[in-house]
Image (cartoon, rainbow, N blue to C red):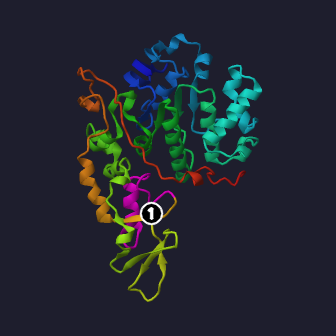
Amino acid sequence: MIRFEGAGKRHPDGTIAVEGLDLEVPTGRTTVLVGPSGCGKTTLLRMVNRMVEPTSGRVLLDGTDVAELEPAKLRRGIGYVIQQAGLFPHRRVIDNIATVPRLLGWDRKRARARAAELLELVGLAPDLAKRYPFQLSGGQQQRVGVARALAADPPVLLMDEPFSAVDPVVRAGLQDELLRLQSELHKTVLFVTHDIEEAVRLGDQVVVLREHGKIAQLADPHTLLTAPADDGVAAFLGRDRGLRGLGLRPASAVVLRPVDAGLRYGNWELALDDERRPIGWIDRAAASAELHPAAGFRPEADTLRTALDAAVLSPAGVAVALDADGRATGTASREAVLAALPALSALPAPAVDGADGADGVPLRKDGAPGTPTVSRTDSRADSRADSRTDGAAGGR
């Protein structure tokens, strides 16, 4: 667990970066710091590994003040991922990943074996091990950066806008991989971003910061989107925060029309191949039998937002539900997707110890300020096979 107790940073010229912050980062969860530029996000993150020294208060790591720990030793026990990956250009991928284990005294064979395991864990092909960073795509470099941060199996992972320098498609794939890794490894993750969509997608708890590192709201993603603490937080979240909320809800709530019940909606009919995979929509009122794309979603893997998007993109206004092999299992009109919303709004918000107090800070059963213990269903499209290559033509 990471705990900030009255942590502050005042620069020599008198500029206040962070002032009197109290915050708990729960063990095994992902806490996201989000806010406008200059609000102190990165300063707070770097206080944990002593790259920035607080001028007031303290930072505790599992109950120990980090100021009492030798900086180099502290940093070797904490994973750190930055925006541009920060790989050593003169070292091959496998040796970049093996850096911290080697510093900890592992022999070369053991460190390289661990690096090879991590290549697979982050979804990179083994033949990339012998390449240099300049021979990788941006997304591949970021995956190597994550692998390097995990090499010595640190309990804490600090991530400073790690995906902001890559294109949106690669970024979504990297986010998927982080969610998958966290579901398996349960690290204590402190993640910095300026992107609220990324924050609500990745965070178990989200901390919205204002100037000088003041907490505007601390909440789980569902509460943040549905009950912003004030007009300032609501403005930061944006007018489409309701749509973002759809991205937190599983598409399994949609009631499907079975394939056997018919594939025709008005003039539109869904064509399937012999294995029941969608080929496209046919307009029976048209003179030609031109096929129009059939957008699909996976009820057990995707979100309501994906399902609604698929229905909106369809010429028939109907999304096709698919199984893991891409076979049609049912259909859902726009109205069917939207009909899932009232039922979901009646569901309780992700679980915390008690009711929320002022500023969206949850209360423990004793009424004292606490930290959310969030139970979430993270829904991801199974597009990882594509994202793992990240446009990998190999080199550039």
Q: Is residue 82 left or right of residue 227?
A: right
Q: Residue at x 65, y 45 (%)?
A: 124
Q: Residue at x 53, y 38 (%)?
A: 181
Looking at the picture, how far across and down is residue 144, in whole percent?
64, 39
To which residue does mark 1 refer?
Answer: 296
Q: Is residue 294 above or below residue 111?
A: below
* Mark 1 surroundings: few (<14), some (14-19) or many (≥20) residues within 10 A: many
The residue nearer to you, when weighing 370 against 8, is: 370
Amino acid type, label 1: Gly
Q: Is residue 349 left or right of residue 281?
A: left
Residues shaded magenta? 297-324
The residue nearer to you, when weighing 60 against 155, is: 155
Looking at the picture, how far across and down is residue 127, in whole percent?
74, 45
Disc 1 is placed on an element classified as strand
Q: Is residue 182 above or below residue 54?
A: below
Q: How many marks?
A: 1
Residue 340: quadrant of the picture: bottom left
Residue 160 appears anywhere in the view: no
Looking at the picture, how far across and down is residue 248, in whole percent?
37, 47
Residue 313 within the segment the image draws in magenta? yes
The residue nearer to you, when weighing 180 against 170, is: 180
Residue that protrudes farthest toward the top in the picture: 68
> Which quarter of the image is occupied by the N terminus?
top left
Q: Is residue 250 above or below residue 325?
A: above
Looking at the picture, how far across and down is residue 156, in whole percent?
52, 26
The residue nearer to you, when weighing 162 against 97, is: 97
Q: Is residue 258 left or right of residue 82?
A: left
